[in-house]
Amino acid sequence: MILYGSTLSPYVRKVAAYAAEKGIEIELTPVGLGDPNPDFRAASPFRKMPALRDGDYGIADSSAIIHYLEAKHPEPPLIPADPKERGRVVWFDEWADTMLFACGGKMFFNRIVAPRFLGREGDEAIASAAERDELPPLLDYLEGVIPDSGYLVGDRLTLADIAVASPFANFTHAGVAVDEARHPRVASFAKAILARPSFAPHVERETAFLAKQA
Ligand SMILES: N[C@@H](CCC(=O)N[C@@H](CS)C(=O)NCC(=O)O)C(=O)O
């Protein structure tokens, strides 16, 4: 199975970590933004990463890929069968992809992607406004829903934890630190999930790559 993309994308990192937690072997094939690679384009009609190729089957979008993989490899379940738990897991996955990274993307795009990969200056005013005004209420929400177990749903690892933790690596890359005094649960949640063997090697490689580029 081939996963197209760069784990600098929170969506690609989410799928790579999910696959590692499930014990599913995937080959990560790097593609850049808008990459012309025909196999990538066939799987991702709008050239967004990630995309997956499994034999003659291609599918794009991190959540679609994960639902495909979960149906194909049900054990160990990372999307619960229980209706209420499943609803919460889908909520957190969606919240992370849209609300959390809609905000985080403004910092990551303007501070990392634009200057390092597109050869143009990012708009720091957009990045700092997002960090100052948009991020704190999102983290306030998250702080209030992390249970004592440290897992968002059902007191065990699910897709919810993987999806919500992934953008925190982008926050770190973009120089955004979680305020441990205001958001202690968020800080320890993100640290614990990103330290898992499914995430850590990716985040370390990304950090080294960005440091070398700077
Ligand atoms: N909802 C999609 C989002 C994918 C996405 O927006 N990926 C970005 C990278 S973080 C991308 O490929 N952008 C390129 C573009 O928009 O042309 C998912 O979950 O996979």
Image: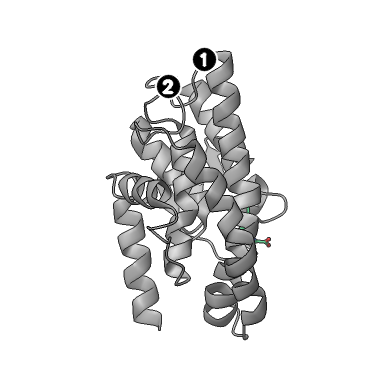
Residue type (three-letter) at the residue carrying disc 2:
Pro
Give the residue at x 56% y 22%: 86
**Colour scheme of the picture:** one colour
Q: Is 9 above or below relative to 21? A: below
Ligand 1 picture quarter: bottom right
In the rendered image, the quadrant that contains the N terminus is top left
The image shows residue 176, relative to residue 89, as above or below, that is below
Is residue 123 visible in the rendered image? The answer is: no
Residue drawn at the location 59% of the way across and 69% of the way down: 132
Quarter of the figure that contains the C terminus: bottom left
Q: Secondary structure at mark 1?
A: loop
* Real-space Cα separation, disc 2 to disc 1, in angstroms: 8 Å
Residue 77 tag number: 2
Callout 2: helix, strand or loop? loop
Q: Nearer the viewer, residue 174 or 65?
A: 174
Whole-percent x, y for residue 115 in the image: 56, 82
Quarter occupied by residue 118: bottom right
Residue 194 visible in the displayed image: yes
Quarter holding residue 208 = bottom left
- What residue sits right under mark 1 in the picture? 81
Q: Are marks 2 and 1 in contact (CB under 8 Å)?
A: yes
Q: Is mark 1 within 8 Å of ligand 1?
A: no
Residue 67 in the figure: left or right of residue 146: right
**Percent from the top left, x then y, of residue 42?**
66, 48
Q: How busy is the neighbourhood of tag 2: few (under 14 within 10 Å), some, or many (20 plus)?
A: some
Look at label 1 and name its amino acid: Ala
